[in-house]
Image: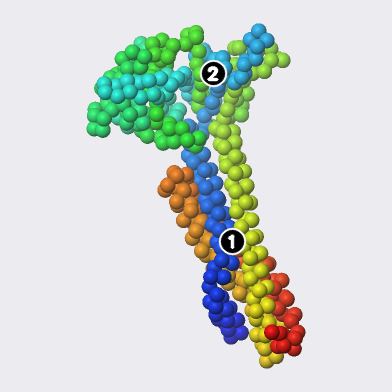
Amino acid sequence: MPFLWLTLVSAFRILRRNPLRAGLTMLGIIIGIGAVIAMVSLGQGATAAVQAEISSLGTNVLIIVPGATSVGGVRGGLGTLSTLTVDDAEDIQNKVYGVTTVIYATRSVLQAISEYKNWSTVILGTTPEFIDVRSWPIAEGNFFTQSDMNSAANVAVLGKTAVQNLFEPGEEVVGSQIRIRNVPLRVIGVLAPKGQSITGQDQDDLVVLPFSTAERKVLGTQFLGSVGIILVAARSQIEIPAIVDDIKDLLRARHRLHQSEDDDFTIRTMEEIANAIAGTSRTMMYMLMGIASISLIVGGIGIMNILLVSVTERTREIGLRMAVGAKRTHILLQFLIEAIIMTAIGGVLGVGFGIGMASLMTNMIGWPTIINTEAVVASFLFSLIVGLFFGLYPANKASKLNPIEALRYE
């Protein structure tokens, strides 16, 4: 124990002789660990944001959109032609076992006009069950009812961003009037804020209308009953694969598709979307971590170079220690401890740098980040391993010096 304590004290004294050199040596370790922690935090935050967005859409929700079509030999890509109808949605609701709720919608981007302001926003025509399937509460007023749907009532529910850009602060929104394509609409409610989606889209920038109102009076349509999207709420996640198969069979039969023809619709599950986005985030995180880890290797090489220089500078000192009884093991441990101390200090500073970078990205850029304790501990331990690995060669070289030749070294 006294030997270890004396070795530690001696190592700190030697590092204090040239603090600038020691600091520059540790810089690669600091940047490497900081970058790794920041990248992992960013990846964890992105994954959490994906999960939150999926939850906001409903974990048991299926999304059905128009697929590729072929008319008269001319093929169109996904969504080029609306192949879904209100009747499709109603058949899914009535005939597919395990389905609890089905909503359908059509959308467009149009100019909404209030008394003093105007704003280009998303106009969404949908059904009264929209807020239930999307788990989207009302902040003020009410959502439209089935009666409003049946009568194609001129009513609208606004998202928070649309409210902020169409009305003055403190102005009464519920009960006021807006116009879209010269159609007057009475605002009956305001949706609670949802924030940005993982793709950066503002979910609150929209005006929601009854589907019948949007179709007949505001948006128009190529033919009555066509829809742009169908959302299906399943009873449980376990039943989703069977429900997907049943919906495919039902829609292929309704659309009179031959066995050799491809589906003219696409069904997406929340799990598929989550896995796709999370997979992309994970790939980017691993790639950036790999790049950041290079800094750790560069830092380790820097430590090895400095220790090799130190061996040359302290050759006489090493020879003197050997002459008074120091063993090879003592010399080896002396240089290894110096390497580990440098990487440990660099590791601590790197952890602080990484947490600071993650906080900066959250505060300044708005990127979601989550500090992962396991990543912090793993990065710090990896820095110690780097120090041990790259310190081994110069330490071994120092321990093999001949005492007589070392004492005569100038």
Asked which secondary structure carries label 1, the reply is: helix
The residue carrying pointer 1 sits among few (fewer than 14), some (14 to 19) or many (20 or more) residues within 10 Å by Cα, namely many
> What residue do we see at 31% from left, 26% from top?
166
Asked if 392 appears above or below 124 in the picture, the reply is: below
* Numbered mark located on residue 28 in the image: 1
Where residue 119 appears, as percent x and y from the top left, is 35, 24
Asked which secondary structure carries label 2, the reply is: helix
The quarter of the picture where residue 129 lies is: top left
Where residue 270 appears, as percent x and y from the top left, is 55, 32
Real-space Cα separation, disc 1 to disc 2, in angstroms: 59 Å
Where residue 81 appears, as percent x and y from the top left, is 56, 15
Relative depth, front residue between 232 and 304 = 304
Q: Are marks 1 and 2 in contact (CB under 8 Å)?
A: no
Where residue 231 appears, as percent x and y from the top left, is 50, 24
Residue flagged by tag 2: what amino acid is it? Ile
Question: Which of marks 2 and 1 precedes in the sequence?
Answer: 1
Asked if 242 appears above or below 225 in the picture, the reply is: below
Asked if 82 appears above or below 40 in the picture, the reply is: above
- Report if residue 12 is visible in the image: no
> What residue do we see at 69% from left, 84% from top?
410
Circle 2 sits on which residue? 92
> What residue do we see at 59% from left, 47% from top?
285
- Describe residue 182's horizontal placement relative to residue 383 as left or right: left
Relative depth, front residue between 239 and 194 = 194
